[in-house]
Image (cartoon, grey):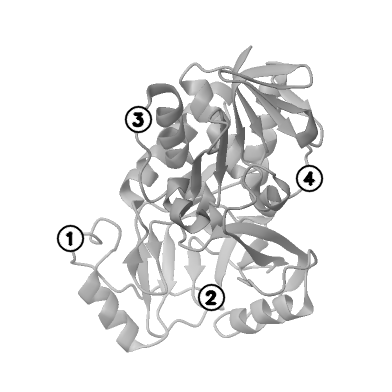
Amino acid sequence: MKDVIIVGSGIAACSLAWQLYQQGKSLTLISDRKKGSSSVAAGVYNPMVLKRFTAVWNAGVQLEVLNNMFDYVLENTDVDVRTPITVARRFHDEKESLTWIKKSVREDLKMFMNSTVQKIDINGIEASSGYGLVNGTGWVDTIKFMSLTLSFFESLDSVSLETFDYSCLETAHDSVSYKSLSAAHIIFADGYRILDNPYFNHLPIQGNKGEVLLIKIPGLELDYILKSSVFLMPYKDDLFWVGATYDRDDLVDVATLAGKEFLTTRLERFMKLPYDIVEHKHGIRPTTIDRRPFVGHHSIDENVWVFNGMGSRAVLIAPWASLQLIGRMFNNQSLHKEIDIKRFEKVNL
């Protein structure tokens, strides 16, 4: 019997699998390999909300846990899926640059914000008001991370490739069974598909469609992730990611002309070089009404757990939230109250 069955294979599920494995827990991943929002995530990890120049909730701790986990992945696979690269916030005007300087000395922000406005000359990029640089940033190759994780656990005979059938799950006081598998616990890290999950479809998940473009810009030499009204991120060769849209209304599972036009018009406000669109991708993010994850167990079947709602910052938050869940599950530690699904109990009565 395994310690855990994990249903899902996105960023959240893969982070959880590595954190469990590092703590010596046995597991099986159940994956249908269908592409969810993780497959279109640019994978940027950034401790700041750059629209308002504020820190991401719990950012310092989350960054530390993120790097510890990916160091462990590197030790076990000889592959580092991280690319450390500075995020440069392009200022729209002098007022923004002055606000940046003022906020950069605050105790909760100074570890992340370079207090000097940078005048960086990048061919083809208009930024007359300069940039603010963010410390500790980078991006994770999410496609490589998910593929690497499945390959690693497949080598341990710990992956089942199938679409999960809820009717085959049986629960007991101290175990669960699913077809030929048995475990002490089962964790659903099934993203937006939680809507089909009879154990947790009451949770107030919000779909949020994100669209990104992969573009080719011959000759652009960019050593930063540029963040303006959209981000421009170097990928490889002459390829760059442009993103992202956030749409809670149109949740049809297709890329849209409106999304494409949103991204291109905002890109062209500051990027003056010719480019070609190589690919237009989309996904439905699992977001929550209070922008905090869903973590906890079912109200009746206490060895049935949810790990969901990581939203657009899954790369940053999932490694830390995984440790929260593991501590609760195996050591009876309290979950951080802001991620515990018990916060919705009064709503559900």
Q: Secondary structure at mark 3?
A: loop
Q: Tag on residue 107?
A: 1
Q: Tag on residue 333?
A: 3
Q: Nearer the viewer, mark 1 or mark 2?
A: 1
Q: Are marks 1 and 2 in contact (CB under 8 Å)?
A: no
Q: Nearer the viewer, mark 1 or mark 3?
A: 3
Residue at the location (63% across, 18% down)?
Answer: 183
Q: Earlier in the sequence, mark 3 or mark 2?
A: 2
Q: Tag on residue 123?
A: 2
Marks 3/2: CA–CA distance: 52 Å
Quarter holding residue 178: top right
Q: Earlier in the sequence, mark 1 or mark 3?
A: 1
42 on left or right of 327: right
Q: Amino acid at mark 3?
A: Gln
Quarter holding residue 90: bottom left
Using a 10 Å C-alpha cutoff, classify the residue at mark 1 as few (fewer than 14 neighbours), some (14 to 19) or many (20 or more).
few
Q: Earlier in the sequence, mark 3 or mark 4?
A: 4
| Image vertical order of residue 247 relative to residue 6, above or below | below
Q: Earlier in the sequence, mark 1 or mark 2?
A: 1
Marks 2/4: CA–CA distance: 39 Å
| Image vertical order of residue 308 relative to residue 244, above or below | above
Marks 3/4: CA–CA distance: 33 Å
Q: Nearer the viewer, mark 2 or mark 4?
A: 4
Residue at the location (36% across, 56% down)?
Answer: 57
Q: Nearer the viewer, mark 3 or mark 4?
A: 3
Q: Secondary structure at mark 1?
A: loop
Q: Earlier in the sequence, mark 2 or mark 4?
A: 4
User: Closest to the observer: 65 or 301?
Assistant: 301
Which residue does the numbered mark 4 point to in the structure image?
34
Marks 1/4: CA–CA distance: 43 Å
User: Where is residue 123 drawn, in percent x and y?
Assistant: 53, 75
15 on left or right of 342: right
